[in-house]
Image (cartoon, grey):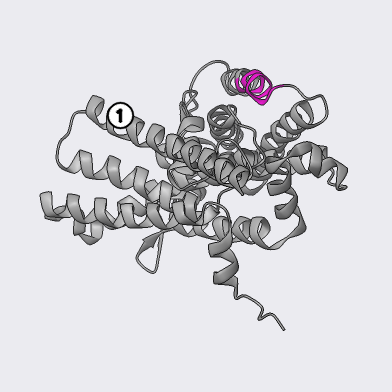
Amino acid sequence: MEKKKSFIGRLMDTKGAGSVLTAFIGLIIIYIAFGILNPKVFSVKNIQNLLRSMSKYLLIGIGQSFVMITGNIDLSIGSVVGMSAMISATLMTRGMNPILAILITIVCGLVVGVVNGFLVGKFKLPPFIATLGTMFVARGVGYIVNGNRNTDNIASGIGKEAGDRFQDIFYYGKFLGVFNTFWIALIIFIIFFFLLSRTRTGRHIYAIGSNVDAARLSGVDVVMTTTKAYLVSAFCSVVVGFVLAAQSGMGNMDAGNMYEMYGVAAGVIGGVSPLGGSGILLGTFAGAGVWQTLENGLNMIHAQVGFQRIVIGVIVVASVLLDVVVRNSNRSFKKKK
């Protein structure tokens, strides 16, 4: 009788597990290297700030990873982040209860996810075109909601106590010495890690990314599964919008610019294939860590911003190139067999 594999064993058999391990090793090496160059990298304060900043990349990386595993992409992420920051902040500056403002904003963000899912899954629009359109629409809503200007301080509408509470929950507050932003991201990560690795929906997401026609013939509801992936992306983007609103204490119309690309970077650095069908959210966790550690470390050694972008860009291209090479090698090996 064949012995049943442990959860760790099954995880390591998942496509992309080797890339995850590589990303974590790279993260450790990068962190130690920057720590040698500037010992302040190892300080408790820097670690706390690093984890808080990394959380934004982790959240959008989770959303983009879900979509990429289906073989698609979501260009609307950054705009949904900005739209969410503007809607929530605008409602609060006008005196709405923060909880109600948060719920309304979540609904608005999920609407974008549903639209993306149906455009790509049901109407078969190329995901680049479909989400490019919703990217402009969401950004436009973010501009219009407060009359094409940034909002006032949220405390001006709900009072200083409620405003401080909102900011503490999503950005400035701490629990066990770690900023709440990280705990929120970690909880969301655990929930969606379970969804992707242990549920039927997760298996269907991988199936669509591997071969959408075969998945459809096997009884997978492609439209619904694609929509679920885009809903995850939209939800994570909304949460990042709350984080940015809490960080600045107001709604900024340009919040979230380029975040869709940061999500792609966090995913592909951690081994999530942009070609679909493979990747583990643990890799996205490592990818977000690598991205933020590079950004943090390069800042700590006073590297120019242009150089920072070059380094991160090279790593992203190298990660995708490695994925393509590995896939081609696997195909060649299977043909020889």
Circle 1: element type: helix
Magenta region, mostly helix, strand or loop?
helix
Q: Name, please, the residue furthest toward the bottom.
A: 1
The part of the chain drawn in magenta is: 126-135
**Left or right placement of residue 297 versus residue 190 in this view:** left
Q: Position of residue 236 (x, y in %)?
A: 58, 44
- Rendering quarter of residue 292: top left
Residue drawn at (19%, 28%) of the image: 304
Q: Quadrant of the N terminus?
A: bottom right
Residue 104 in sight here: no
Residue 178 in sight here: yes
Residue drawn at (50%, 23%) of the image: 253
Residue in front for this viewpoint, 23 or 264 = 23
Q: Position of residue 145 (x, y in %)?
A: 62, 22
Residue drawn at (55%, 60%) of the image: 187
User: Image height check: is 266 above or below 47?
Assistant: above
Q: Position of residue 214 (x, y in %)?
A: 80, 42
The residue that label 1 is drawn on is 309
How many numbered marks have been drawn onto this rendered protein structure? 1
**Left or right placement of residue 130 versus residue 223 in this view:** left
Q: Name, please, the residue furthest toward the top.
A: 148
Please, what is the three-letter code of the amino acid marked with disc 1? Arg
Residue in front for this viewpoint, 266 or 320 = 320
Asked whether 315 falls inside the magenta stretch, the response is: no
User: Image height check: is 23 above or below 70?
Assistant: below
Q: Name, please, the residue furthest toward the front.
A: 336
**Left or right placement of residue 50 versus residue 137 in this view:** left
Q: Position of residue 197 (x, y in %)?
A: 64, 59
